[in-house]
Amino acid sequence: MIVELGHYALILAFVVASLQAILPMIGAERRDPVLMALAGPAATAQFLLIAVSFGALTYAFVTNDFSLRLVVNNSHTLKPMLYKVAGVWGNHEGSLLLWVLALSFYGATAHWFGDQLPMGLKARVLAVQGAIGAAFLAFMLWTSNPFLRLASPPMNGHDMNPLLQDPGLAFHPPFLYLGYVGLSMAFAFAVAALIEGRVDAAWGRWVRPWTLAAWLFLTIGITMGSLWAYYELGWGGFWFWDPVENASFMPWLIATALLHSAIVVEKRESLKAWTMLLAILAFGFSLVGTFIVRSGVITSVHAFASDPTRGMFVLAILAVFVGGALTLFALRAGALEAKGVFAMVSRETGLVVNNLLLTVACFVVFIGTIWPLVAEILWNRALSVGAPFFNAAFMPFAIGLAIVLPIGAVLPWKRADLGRAMKPFAGALALTVAAALLAYAVTGGVSTLGPLGVALAVWLVAGVAVDLLQRCGRGSVGQRLGRLRRLPRADWGRAMAHAGFGVAIFGIVTLTTWAVEDIRVLKIGESYDLGPYNVQLMGISDQPGPNYTARVAEMRVTKGGAEVALMHPAKRTYPIAGMATTEAAIRPGIFGDIYLVVGDPQDGGGYAVRSYLKPFADWLWLGGLMMALGGMLSLSDRRFRVAAGARRSTPVAVAAE
Amino acid sequence: MKRIAAGLALALLATPVFAVRPDEMLADHALEARARALSQGLRCLVCRNESIDDSDAELAHDLRVLLRSRLTAGDSDEQAVAYIVARYGEFVLLNPTTRGANLILWGAGPAALLAGAVLAFSVTRRRARAPEVSALSAEDQAKVKALLDKTPS
């Protein structure tokens, strides 16, 4: 019964979303306040209906309702409760339901917090949101319905893919989807503004909070996914340039560019058309990502047993929304009058360079991702584009960004003097060179890329310090600290995010350049040296789990005779799913991780053991979280709250910075 | 993340064993290091975008052994890779060649950067040369003056 209610709510949500897409748009065209006012309640209703539907599916998973096909294919009575709940989105249909739940949530927030939006703009934004929602709800109902029943329910289910039975599943997809889908708000605002033909500084301020929120969720989602891969896959890889990963990375790159160009619209009323284009592309790439993940076209090698109609459906959605928006853009962009004037050297041009590097980097990732498909279609040539290509093609852009960033961030608006802006960076530059030389010397000069990466990381963090130091001006220490404390939150957010970029680069470079690896056969009682440590295999035992059995090794790590850690790498066998997973034992540390994996028993006795030292590994994810925290700080800035209350009080001008 | 994503997309994977296994490694460290470096650029044909160095699949194991046997037989890096490409096709190369149409792939980034830079430069220069926005019309200025005069300083 509850499942039928959920199914019914989903159908109703489709109807509501369709109405939300059509009526307010007509209302905005005819200046009919009644039709326009429908948009808000419709958005709330759509969200509540999808939430009911989501709740019903969760209920079916929690209560092991094996009359549902989805539950049979992805669950089992013995599966731990955490994965029964998180398992709702551990499959195509359920994850799509989470997707539309997030989408309708964003639409509803535009209603709940959008009091100050002009009525016409708000109606159009919500109508575009409704249209996206209707398209995806149709996609669900016609090709991927999670509520399909089975005529003869089995006694138990097939269990979920064991790789997914990890706490990571509870957090990674929801954050990723909140990010992907949040970009639909920027898209809706752009389309609404293009229809109205008016973009001003206020538009920049309205669209920014949603873009920031989407960006920070996407940052957290990608960071957590990479951490999950690091500890789950058994050898410490964290990024593979797989099409599915690129699918999340491309919208992130464009969203990052959008965040920066929206600042120019907000503060200087320039780059309007460009910002519109980025807003369309950001969500466009998020749809491209959906297509890549759900169709399986690009990763064709026997990966997805999915239905080609799904791919066609998403492609049609992509064509209608992105094609439509780009057509609208082509027709209307000329009318967007740029106001702000800026010189060749200015904060504006700094941000243009940022945008150029980010969008071209995204383009490179895009080309690499679709190239196997293009080559197959055009030249019937089966080829692969893997990590070596992406590393080589992407790295120059990351390096360029890191070099330019600290200087671009301190340039004044409108007109700047490059020489004068560079002057305070003398100390930072010296520090950077020193760090590079130190890294080169300490590691014996085996790598040039490593020291370069360390130098870039130091340069970025030192650049942030220079920026903050400049912002607190002259005077006594007390005055300076006071000024520092009164800096707007957005400035702190910027400092945090930029420093996070540096910290992440540091983690990536040290982890990939100076990791130590050891592969060997080890008998019980034997030991070996791993860097400064000594590792001994104490014993192996079998331990039962809820829906698996584990073979757990006990390994003692010592340094100079003193025990550092007792670690328990394991291998789990999931009999129901018929799969095994390796559970690495990781001892995290500020200076690096010890990473141990135990494998199968060997013919001559003993076990295969892999061990790694991963220097500064955790800095990578720390950097990612710092970037997200920067986004949060920026989101809490006063000017958004002031803008939110502007309608109730007298319309005061918002302080420029 | 890829395999997790694959799992998310309901791909069924072969039972993981272990990527590079101790028994397949070569005693000669220099040769083994070459084999490791090469195998990172070769694709496991039955996996999703995984190199044979990372993959647990049986086929990847076979390819690793094959590669090592070629190196021990005295092949250079190029010869060993060519040997495998001749048998499994261009598809095994994770690093695409620069032959034929692949030049477009490799050239796309630099070309886009150049085009973007030219475009950005011309737009910026136009912005730089654009006349300063006329501050206020005469009528508006009169209004401002009236307001300012009214306000007690």
Image (cartoon, rainbow, N blue to C red):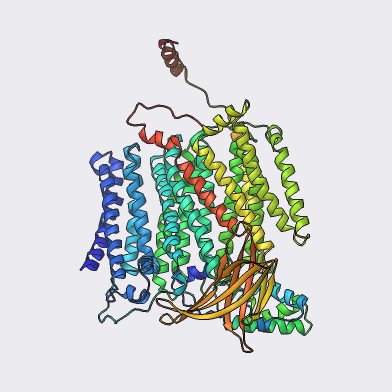
Using residue A388 as the reference point, say whether residue A9 is left or right of it.
left
Give me the residue at 53% from left, 62% from top: A227
Percent coordinates x, y for residue B146 in the rendering: 42, 12
Please identify the quarter of the rendering in which residue B76 is found.
bottom right
Reply above or below: A409 against A378: above
The residue closer to the viewer here, A353 or A158, is: A158
Percent coordinates x, y for residue B141 in the rendering: 46, 16
Percent coordinates x, y for residue A96 in the rendering: 37, 63
Reply above or below: A478 against A622: above
Residue, far bottom: A603
Residue, far front: A562
Reply above or below: A274 against A222: above
The residue closer to the viewer here, A449 or A204, is: A449
Viewer can see residue B45: no
Using residue A392 as the reference point, say whether residue B78 is left or right of it.
right
The residue closer to the viewer here, A248 or A11, is: A248
Q: Quadrant of the N terminus of chain A?
A: bottom left
Percent coordinates x, y for residue A421 in the rendering: 67, 34
Give me the residue at 63% from left, 53% from top: A398
